Image (cartoon, helix red, strand yellow):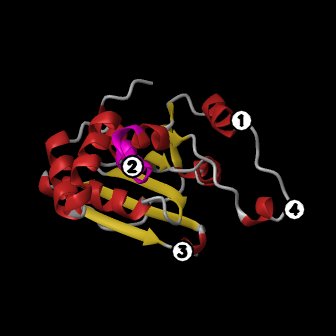
Amino acid sequence: MSANTTNILIVGVGGQGTLLASRVLAQAAMDLGHDVKVSEIHGMAQRGGSVVSQVRYGPQVFSPIIKMGEADVIMAFEKLEAARYLSYLRKDGLIVINTESIDPLPVMSGADVYPENLEQKIAAVVPNTVIMDASGIAEECGNIKAANIVMVGRVGKALQMSKDSLAQAIKTLVPSKAIDINLRALDAGWDFMD
């Protein structure tokens, strides 16, 4: 973590819950007394385009933007997005990759092919890589859409955040009918073994 500031880059495609994940992490960090800055880039989110959220927290944070090579953690909800933003990870940073793959337009049109074994290729160059089937774990918790919170649990534990603060943030930010599933997803991510 650079100068007591923790930098989390959250990447995925529209509809994967990257924005909710950033808000849960930011709310939990604020509840723990940190200064927090968040930046969100939506792109063509509603059409499955790239979505990037940046969460920075610490004693005093001046900018919401994470510079290349300064992310302590990358949460990648989709494998291709993990590869696309890898240059943002600091040398000894952690990358958590969901095994889900969503074909971008060039692949859907047949103009290109989705790269094989992408997460293994990333793990070969990033020693601190966690590969998890967050979507499958979320489905076991009751709803595949809670994959984002599974990943929040895994990253929150890695960053030594308070599980109670994350749970409280979920209760504050998630619709009441989805709270129980999301709390189960948080627990599953928190307890995930590499």
Q: Nearer the viewer, mark 4 or mark 2?
A: 2
| Mark nearer the N terminus (2 vs 1) | 1
Amino acid type, residue under disc 3 in the picture: Gln
x, y percent for residue 61: 27, 62
Location of mark 2 (residue)? 143
Which numbered circle lies on residue 68?
A: none
Residue 89 lies, with reference to residue 123, above or below; the image says below
Q: Residue at x 30, y 65 (%)?
A: 37
Q: Which residues are magenta?
A: 140-151
Q: Residue at x 84, y 57 (%)?
A: 112
Looking at the rendered structure, the secondary structure element under dot 2 is loop
| Mark nearer the N terminus (4 vs 2) | 4
Amino acid type, residue under disc 2 in the picture: Asn
Q: Between marks 1 and 3, how big is the CA–CA gap? A: 27 Å
1 and 3 marks in contact (CB < 8 Å): no
Q: Between marks 3 and 4, how big is the CA–CA gap? A: 22 Å
Q: Residue at x 87, y 62 (%)?
A: 111
| Mark nearer the N terminus (2 vs 3) | 3
Which numbered circle lies on residue 111?
A: 4
Furthest residue in direction top, as rendered = 193
Closest to the observer, 122 or 142: 142
Q: Nearer the viewer, mark 2 or mark 1?
A: 2
x, y percent for residue 58: 24, 53
